[in-house]
Image (tube, helix red, strand yellow):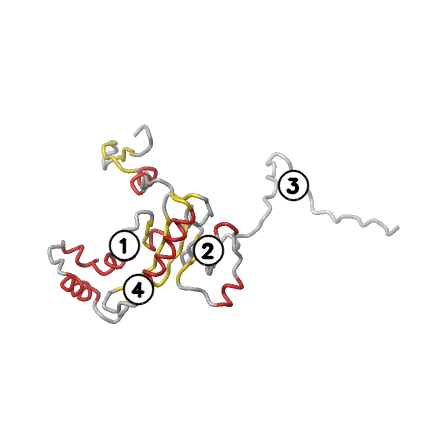
């Protein structure tokens, strides 16, 4: 508690009895204390990951395919050494019209992992794709898309490849640029969220002293032209 990793949450009676993990504690749990690697090695990890994405999307028996992949974090910022390569992926169902639970159960039976819990069976399709994407790469950290949207951090799309017109219209940010990708300032805001540009740009007026009578609206005399 002194280090800010846990906090006491009041119960229904107002007594602080329940321990809750703070945001700092959650970040510590998600952190992986690995030795930093050179950027050249991180580039090789990205190249291998793109090859695996193509291989995953070519397997029609899987429940999901990888629709989009973004890099963010220290690799995106162009640091010379990175602790891991942060990758956010958006999955899409291959057969949206079919029943998802049946597809997951079919993949469970095909893999022979029938001893899983019922919840893991229902999420087998997405977990299978993410496991294939990681493929034992220690310095590759894959973040689900919903978590990535909540973070709202700047990112750069590396998959799918951009068309020639999109590549020309991109404005790179220097060191954080990845060849053949577009700069993306984080996930799009949710529908209905107020935009900063839509807020009125008003200058606050000086507060009126209630003890001072209001000045009458008199016409301002015009100066004669010189």
Residue drawn where x is 38% and y is 44% of the image: 37
Question: Disc 4 marks which residue?
Answer: 55
Foreground mark, 3 or 2, reads: 2
**Marks 2 and 1, the one that precedes in the sequence:** 1
Residue drawn where x is 43% and y is 47% of the image: 39
Instruction: Give the alpha-carbon distance from disc 3 to disc 1, as whole Å.
Output: 75 Å
**Marks 3 and 1, the one that precedes in the sequence:** 1
Q: Quadrant of residue 26?
A: top left
Q: Quadrant of residue 92?
A: bottom left
Instruction: Give the alpha-carbon distance from disc 3 to disc 2, as whole Å.
Output: 62 Å
Foreground mark, 4 or 3, reads: 4
State how many labels appear.
Answer: 4
Instruction: Give the alpha-carbon distance from disc 4 to disc 3, as whole Å.
Output: 76 Å
Question: Disc 2 marks which residue?
Answer: 178
Residue drawn where x is 24% and y is 65% of the image: 62
Q: Position of residue 54 (x, y in %)?
A: 33, 64
């Amino acid at each position: 508690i002194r280090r800010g990793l846990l906090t006491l949450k009041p119960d229904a009676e107002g007594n602080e009895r329940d321990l809750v993990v703070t945001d700092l504690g959650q970040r510590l749990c998600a952190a992986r204390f690995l030795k930093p690697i050179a950027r050249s090695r991180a580039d090789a990890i990205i190249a291998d990951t793109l090859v695996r994405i193509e291989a995953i999307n070519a397997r029609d028996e899987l429940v999901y395919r990888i629709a989009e992949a973004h890099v963010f974090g220290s690799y995106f910022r162009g640091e010379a050494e990175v602790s891991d390569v942060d990758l956010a992926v958006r999955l899409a169902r291959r057969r949206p019209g079919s029943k998802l639970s049946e597809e997951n159960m079919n993949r469970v039976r095909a893999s022979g992992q029938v001893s899983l819990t019922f919840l893991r069976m229902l999420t087998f399709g997405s977990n299978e794709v993410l496991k294939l994407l990681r493929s034992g790469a220690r310095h590759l950290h894959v973040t689900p898309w919903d978590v990535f949207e909540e973070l709202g951090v700047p990112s750069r799309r590396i998959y799918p490849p951009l068309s020639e017109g999109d590549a020309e219209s991109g404005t790179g940010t220097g060191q954080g640029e990845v060849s053949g990708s577009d700069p993306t300032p984080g996930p799009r805001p949710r529908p209905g969220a107020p935009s900063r540009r839509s807020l009125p740009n008003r200058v606050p007026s000086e507060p009126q002293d209630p003890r001072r009578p209001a000045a009458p609206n008199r016409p301002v005399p015009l100066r004669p032209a010189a």
